[in-house]
Image (tube, helix red, strand yellow):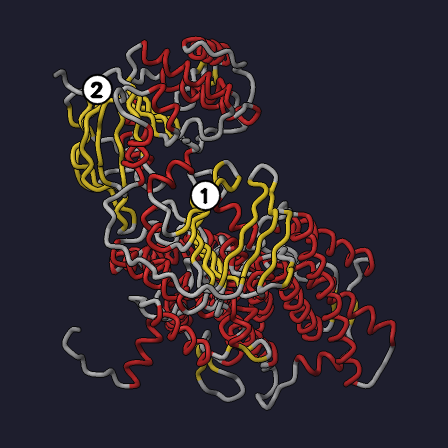
Amino acid sequence: MSTPRVRFRGITKRFMGIVALRDVSFDVAAGSCHAICGENGAGKSTLGRVLAGVHRADEGSIELDGVPIHFPSPRHALDAGVAMVHQELAFCENLTVADNLSLGALPRRFGFVDTAALHARAVELLSAIGASIDPTRTMASLSVAEQQVVQIAAAVGAGAKVIIFDEPTSSLGETEAENLYKLIGQLRARGVTQLFVSHRMPEIFALCDSITVLRDGQHVATQPTAGFSEAALVRQMIGRDLAPLAVAAPSARGRERLRVERLASPGRFEEISFSVHAGEIVGLAGLVGAGRSEIARAVFGLDPDATGSIAVEGKPVRIRHPRDAVRLGIGFVPEDRKKQGLVLGMRSRENATLPTLKSFSRGGWIDRRGESAAVGASFERVALRAGAESAVGALSGGNQQKVVIAKWLTAKSDLLILDEPTRGVDVGAKAELHAWIAKRAAEGAAILLISSELPELLGLATRILVLREGRLRGELTQGEATQDALLRLMAGLA
Amino acid sequence: MTTPRAAPSGLAKLGLTLVRSPQFGLVVVLLLLGTTLTLAAGSHVDPQSGREVNNFLNRYTLIQMATDASAFAIMGVGATLVIIAGGIDLSVGAIYALSGVAMAMVLRALGPMDPVTTVLVGLSVCVAVSLLCGLANGLMVIGLGVHPFIITLGTMWILRGIAFVISRAESILVPTSLTAVAKAPLGLGTALYPVPLLAMLAVTAAGGIYLSRTVAGRHILAVGGNAEASRFSGLSVPRITLGVFVLSGLAAGAAAFLGAAFYGSATSSDANGYELYVVASAVVGGASLSGGKGSAISAMLGAVLIVMMRQAIRTLRLDQNYEWIIIGVAMIVAVVLDQRGTKLLAGRLSRVA
């Protein structure tokens, strides 16, 4: 065996105590196109960023052509021949393509920028990868695809022998993606090693020689693409040994708490009709981008473009703002708890009463005792392992999520929308959250559960609705739902 | 659990609470500066009583400083609300000028009235004008979707311009009954006017209680801390934004009433440049320009610190021409120290977690 171009050895990376990567080791052969797959949050982008010098690994080492390397910054990585094409493109938007391509090394004459040389260099770099973009255009005027091409030109021009692509086609149209695939083919022909972070099956199988699968920050497998099936890959990405998950006993189905009829939002989803009854946990399954969170947001009044009708407790209602939803007794645990779920600078108590502070007040004055009592009871029910006065920003992911949930317990919401409630939460807290969800349903709450983790859906949901490309594609009851059946519906395999 | 510790006595507990309070650093700085000035100031013999009096630590200087600080502090409490909510209000000096001029003109047009009516009418005019100004700021910020810096920079010129035009740049005297209120001795003796000091303390207390004890105050902190999470919790972000601009306007109106009454006149150039002193008071007091953090008491202490530094230049007989340079340097130092402290604290918190 020849020396691998890149060798990851025991890479571990933590963010604020949360493990993003745990002891990841694998090799990338020189000149190959190597896919890195995994669910959202599996750590694939983090791994790319560690290699590109954006993050520094807490443990482990990386070897480039057999030589251990340490990149304190992306600049150092680039000098060593490792470049990254980012999801969020890092450019000076108001400068021209030529400026951006030479940024950091502007050609100078008598102390002024040498415009002619600048232009010539840009043309040279762009034509080297067969691109025909006018270098005098500003970055802001380019499409995302064109901006990517400029990033690639910059990387190749800097002599990169390893290029990391982070979900490069996530915001591209079909033809643009095709062009990118061609470019990737060209780069491979030149012997550039490519790491391709993606969760799109077709492109992985079309482009890549080998595949590494990450799950929950851990390395699952590295294998050649040949002789490997999409379904097997999906299972490796999502599936896990069915950990003993508290299976919710189907509780008595009560009255209808939520009915959604022909809900639609242009470009997001259409023709969505379903109902959730008291005592039910209705799962919403689908691959990333299928429209699950979008539906949740629409029901909670966060999508001004949504049309269709919604009835709560049998009565038709209009929900135009989350305020309306809160008043109707709907609680929403959003996908991104740090951005949407919590005010990180406030205390746990203050977060837990944010939607309902008025009910703990008289004439605008906060009744501190009433507030503390209610919050204490809620925190006890979710088994929060921190005081009510703790700074919520300093809590672990699991405790933060418990605070978000306590918010809706305090609000006495009996209709809960949970969007990835256990994402980024450690195993212990996860089990507690599962038990809590099952208990709330048994108490008569109606729960809409969105999750990318199939075992979670299979263990908890009484019924599972499957979404693909913004439409409902099927419904499975607890008895008939299996990982296989769900995966098939989600991916659109017959 | 660890071994049980002896329960701290009440006094120790109080001490701990004080040391941990966010105002502790500022208070220490104020006390240090005050002590330094007292020691360095020297003393003179009071011709009336014949006793030796410290040049800094005497009733007249302290009350004078409080009077100077009161305008910054009262407006600073209002501006702090805006800053906590994630905005900024640069128009407070102009609102001050317009409210004062409008009050003086209305009272002049109405002619002599009995003292109580005069005070009530004057106060009403100030409140009404400043409320409208704040409302205009808030409505434009939420309606036009332009950053409050730009909107209030615009209204800063517009409102001062209106004051200039309607007053024809005249200095307009206000009735003596107003001055009698603002300069009421309240038993302290001649040439000692405690009313601005008391007003400053009252507004600070009101602001502090508003932020910590009312639903509206909590909502301001939440919106400034994370507007999206607040919206996801059902809060109306535009309404809360509107509210803080109205309150900031009202605070400027209150300061204008007090100022015009105290000094006996109002002109369109009153409170010129105060907006920056006000913002400085808030940030020296630890308010974060990115929102979510700040307190009324700290804003007042910030205002007192700025005034005390100006006083230091006079007391220490430094060259007055260096005043702005000294204040500028001190403000940057204060904010940097505060941020370093916050970072240290955040680091400690994350290590505990």
Between marks 2 and 1 in the image, the one whose residue lies nearer the viewer: 1
In the image, residue A172 sits, relative to residue B30, either above or below, namely: above
In this picture, residue B203 sits left or right of residue A380: right
Q: Please, what secondary structure does the residue beneath circle 1 have?
A: strand
Q: In the drawing, what numbered circle is on residue A466?
A: 1
Question: Dot 2: within a 10 Å radius of its alpha carbon, few (fewer than 14), some, or many (20 or more) residues?
Answer: many
Q: Chain of mark 1?
A: A
Q: In the drawing, what numbered circle is on residue A29?
A: 2
Question: Residue at 14% of width from left, 18% of height from top?
Answer: A3
In the image, residue A281 sits, relative to residue A117, either above or below, namely: below
In the image, residue B324 sits, relative to residue A157, either above or below, namely: below
Question: Residue at 56% of width from left, 48% of height from top?
Answer: A273
Residue A206 shows in this picture: yes
Label 2 sits on what residue type? Ala
Location of residue B227 in the rendering, given as x and y in whole percent from the top left corner: 52, 55
Q: Please, what secondary structure does the residue beneath circle 2 have?
A: loop
Question: Residue at 79% of width from left, 58% of height from top?
Answer: B169
Q: Chain of mark 2?
A: A
Location of residue A98 in the rendering, given as x and y in whole percent from the top left corner: 49, 17
Sequence order check, earlier mark of 2 and 1: 2
Location of residue A231 in the rendering, given as x and y in whole percent from the top left corner: 32, 31
Label 1 sits on what residue type? Val
In this picture, residue A487 sits left or right of residue A134: left
Residue B314 shows in this picture: no
Q: CA distance from mark 2 to mark 1?
A: 38 Å
Q: Quadrant of the N terminus of chain A?
A: top left
